[in-house]
Amino acid sequence: MKVLMFYETAPDGLPKAREHFPAHRARLAAFHERGVLLMAGPYGNPPVAALGIFTTREAAEEFVKDDPFVLHGVVARYYFQEWNEVLTGE
């Protein structure tokens, strides 16, 4: 089982995202290198939200806790959902 992390962009979030993207990207890379973040990225054009796929809920919660996008108001709301990926057999 995986955990999906959904971010909803704040109405004034995109300008803030540009400023805080380097620190956010570094956090993404660190969690990916640890093997607990499998994929992440925005969706919509322009972006309206983002999705991250984590190996555990604990890892997703740890990520959100100190993510610059959450701390600086890029994200209006976030939530988690369990996901049973059927193609890997897990």
Image (tube, rainbow, N blue to C red):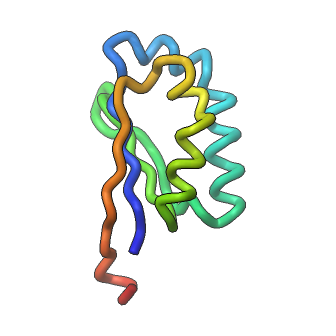
Classify residue 47 as left or right of residue 16.
Answer: left
Q: Residue at x 33, y 75 (%)?
A: 85
| The furthest residue to the bottom | 89
The number of numbered discs placed on residues in the rendered structure image is: 0
- For the N terminus, give its image quadrant: bottom left
Q: Residue at x 51, y 67 (%)?
A: 55
Q: Nearer the viewer, residue 7 or 59?
A: 59
Q: Nearer the viewer, residue 16 or 57?
A: 57
- For the C terminus, give its image quadrant: bottom left
Is 87 located above or below residue 32 in the figure? below
Classify residue 2 as left or right of residue 46.
Answer: right
Residue 33, percent from left and from top: 71, 60
Classify residue 28 as left or right of residue 48.
Answer: right
Residue 10, percent from left and from top: 35, 19
Q: Residue at x 57, y 38 (%)?
A: 65
Q: Residue at x 56, y 23 (%)?
A: 71
Quadrant of residue 7 within the rendered picture: top left
Residue 87, percent from left and from top: 32, 83
Residue 73, percent from left and from top: 47, 18
Is 68 located above or below residue 27 in the figure? above
Is 26 located above or below residue 85 in the figure? above
